[in-house]
Amino acid sequence: MARTPKSNMPSNGGETHQVAESGDAATVLTTNQGIVVSDNQNSLKSGARGPTLLEDFVLREKIFHFDHERIPERIVHARGTGAHGYFEATDDISDLSKAALFRKGERTEVFVRFSTVAGGAGSVDTPRDVRGFAVKFYTSEGNWDLVGNNIPVFFIQDAMKFPDLVHAVKMEADRGYPQAGSAHDTFWDWASLMPETTHMLMWAMSDRTLPRSLRMIEGFGVHTFLLVNEAGETHFVKFHWKPKLGLQSTIWDEALKLQAADNDYHRRDLFEAIDAGNFPEWELGIQVFDKAFADAQPYDVLDATKLIPEEDVPVRIIGRMVLDRNVDNFFAETEQVAFCPANIVPGVDFSNDPLLQGRLFSYLDTQKSRLGTANFHQIPVNAPRCPFQNFQRDGQMQMAVPKGRANYEPNSLAAHGEEGGPRESPARGFASSTTLSGEDESGEKLRIRPESFADHYSQARLFYRSQTQSEQAHIASSFVFELSKVAQLDQVPPRMVANLRNVDEDLAKRVATGLGIPLPKAAKPAKEPVDMAPSDALSIHKNMKAMLEGRAVGILIADGTDASELDAVIASVEKAKGKAMIVAPKVGGAKLSDGSQRKADGQLAGSPSQLFDAVAIILSAEGCAALLKEGAAVEFAMNAFGHLKAIGASEAAQPLLDKAGVVADDGVTGLGDAFIKAASQRFYAREPGLRTLA
Ligand code: HDD
């Protein structure tokens, strides 16, 4: 019994058929072979209640394709989010690099993917974790991938140790947990046995790993690279991304509560900002230095566990990057984008950093396994925007259709009037320049770590001593938190604290006291640490910008809220370029003092204050009385206070503040200008009165 459903006519299952309005080939649903589908609801059966027929190619194709939708997730950095944009060179560095993308005024299309490291693709956005910051520049001379992190150093010095690091930090092999976090036995067992991780651990235990927004993180190329100019002269270089919105992190309790409030906090924040036209922006900076400088340092510039203090080599800004377009399809673009540090353009080159050298192999290899074919470079998000051609042929999922017989060279096919294919260009081609970098490139074959990599503590100490008191307390407390999760309390934490004694005696004592263990003997360092001059660039607190731009203010209202007070707060938040979000007990909104109904952006139960940078609580006496009975309202104020945020409140809201334990300080204000000023910052001085930090 054939059925020909009409537009939106319910089928026998009560379902809706949405039928193409016209026969236009572009709007009708088809199979992958282009056959128009007449019914996308019912499989082909022998009789209305009979068995489904194998002949049903529409069903088979649909299920077959669905069965193969997932591809292996990235072994690390599986959870990420991406966006398109452009890079614009703003300074002339032709004396340093011949790369076309650095020509002043040149605009280059980019794709950026931010990620967490340890968690799976379905994990949350806000664990304590390093953030990946990978940029693909589609330059006119080919693709350059700068695959960095939001931390300028790394856990290990040699790529040989990468699988061990990743095995130790990811969920434990036998039990499959914990997901997306380093606070467990195997990570700290490994890390405490690897003193070279100490500097990176200081960063990982700091608030750098708890960013408020991906728009508020720095990015670093980590390794020392080379810049090469037209004359073939080389300089060492480190790359830095500096966010226009300044640095901002959450605090630990807030990050934990964010995991409950919004698993997608960072990707939503990035997507919505771009969608609203508030395009995130970073400056690209370089630290350039020569061999004489490198040789004079107490550390080795080829060691990825070391940074170069900005006070020693200032960061020179040479361009800006703007992310101005969200992806159209998450899988096609963000999931399939394939970064390879080996993708490099003339004018930039690799150094002999042994971690970088290992990465040059690893990424190409992983893309083949993840994307299934050596032709992954043809996927639109990966394909260069400049012409590319060679004699590589065939392979799975070959999309190009090369013409003619020229799939080898040398050939003389052109002499017979045939297409001879492309040829190498010594003048324009990439020529490795490492012989000019002054590094050791000859000698015996050795499996050895250079002596110059032996100091594992001086820069960890530099980092710790460059932090504010509040930041130091956060670092000490994170060590205590993470090591408290380790089951072998008598083994691993003492070993870790023994390492920390080489960093800073006070830090080691705080961690030991916080854990309630005796202070162990200091570990014997491979090389005695030295004191370096503290660097302000390493502190988040010294690099925050007091601004509402890019930040959100949550405004709690209820029935009876004064309409003019509410409108005034919204107007002043928006004037300061912040985002005002109304929260009410019901998403339909509240009936204001003037009788009007004001819709809410979020329902109180689902919009806790951790989602916002500051809160305003605008209530009438009756509204406040009603909210005193709502746990979520009390927590709204309590957590905003606990997370060191500004709270601007109407007078009638005072009983709610009292119940929430909010006490007066600089961050607790009325609703006027004082609130807007306070809302642009956090109140770290409040914290010692609120919780015990190590
Ligand atoms: Fe890596 C992914 C950053 C060391 C092997 N890495 C990956 C991504 C970032 C980084 C941002 C995600 C890229 C994306 O969004 O698709 N990795 C780093 C940094 C490192 C580093 C800054 C040290 C300075 N990585 C490193 C080493 C190895 C790898 C030493 C192996 C020897 N990394 C990989 C990988 C991944 C990866 C397994 C997983 C998915 C991918 O490559 O595409 O190949």
Image: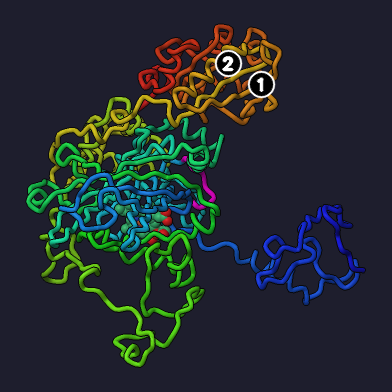
Task: Give the percent coordinates (x, y) of residue 585.
Answer: 66, 23
Task: Give the percent coordinates (x, y) of residue 128.
Answer: 42, 40
Residue 516: within the magenta? no
Work out whether 579 lies above or below 66.
above
Work out whether 587 lies above or below 444.
above
Q: Dividing the picture into quarters, in which one does residue 378 lie?
A: bottom left
Work out whether 244 lies above or below 153.
above
Work out whether 169 lies above or below 557.
below
Quadrant (top left/top right/bottom left/bottom right) for the C terminus: top left
Q: Label for residue 566?
A: 2
Query: Where in the image, quadrant-wise, is ligand 1 located?
Result: bottom left
Give the total of numbered labels: 2
* Relative side of 507 to 571, left or right: left
Q: The residue under label 1 is which amino acid type? A: Arg
Which residue lies at the image location 32% right of the left edge and 25% below the top edge? 470
| Residue under pointer 1 | 598
Between 122 and 377, the one nearer to me in the picture: 377
Task: Give the percent coordinates (x, y) of residue 64.
Answer: 66, 69
Asked whether residue 198 appears in the rendered view, the answer is: no
Residue 125: within the magenta? yes
Asked whether residue 654 appears in the rendered view, the answer is: yes
Which residue lies at the image location 32% right of the left edge and 43% below the top edge? 320
Q: CA distance from mark 2 to mark 1?
A: 10 Å
* Relative side of 559 to 452, left or right: right
* Relative side of 77 to 260, left or right: left
Q: Which residues are magenta?
A: 120-126
Q: The residue under label 2 is which amino acid type? A: Leu
